[in-house]
Amino acid sequence: MSTVFIAFQTNDDSRPIVESILADNPKAVLDEQPAMVKINAEGRLVINRKSIEERIGRHFDLQELQINLITISGHLDEDDDQFSLTWKN
């Protein structure tokens, strides 16, 4: 299986997003660097809108991910409720 990842700028806006991703993907691995936080996962990584909303206390449009997004690796599938990265072997 191949590793997928997503990386964000390290700041207050991305912190609850990262927390949500880690909560929803227990096998994901966090790689913190001075100006970037990267989340790696084998095969699949899912970001759920509702998880982020619970942490920030307001409506969250998944398009807002792009504000602090640095890069991704994997096949992207996105709708209003979920953003997922996968590698289909």
Image (cartoon, helix red, strand yellow):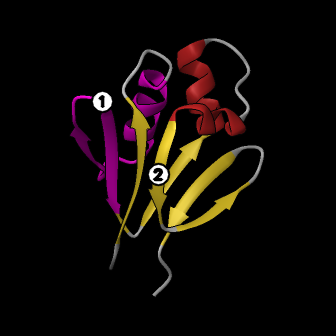
Q: Which numbered dot is residue 5?
A: none
> Which image quarter: residue 41?
bottom left
Seen as rendered, the residue at the extreme right is 80
The residue indicated by pointer 1 is 35
Dot placed on the residue nearer the N-terminal end, 1 or 2: 1
Residue at screen point 49% across, 30% down: 17
Residue at screen point 66% across, 32% down: 64
**Percent position of residue 51, x then y:** 56, 31
> Which image quarter: residue 36?
top left
Count of all numbered marks drawn on residues in the image: 2
Residue at screen point 47% across, 26% down: 14
Q: At label 2, which amino acid type do we have?
A: Thr
**Percent position of residue 87, x then y:** 47, 75
From this view, report whether residue 18 is shown above or below residue 77.
Answer: above
Which element is circle 2 on? strand
Q: At label 1, which amino acid type do we have?
A: Ala
Q: In screen coordinates, is 9 left or right of 80?
A: left
Label 1 neighbour load within 10 Å: few <14, some 14-19, many 20+: few
Seen as rendered, the residue at the extreme bottom is 89
**Percent position of residue 10, x then y:** 36, 26
**What segment carries the magenta color?**
14-41
Label 2 neighbour load within 10 Å: few <14, some 14-19, many 20+: few
The residue indicated by pointer 2 is 71
Cα distance in 3D space between marks 1 and 2: 13 Å
Assess whether residue 39 is covered by the magenta stretch: yes
The reply to whether dot 1 and dot 2 touch (C-beta < 8 Å) is no
Which element is circle 1 on? loop
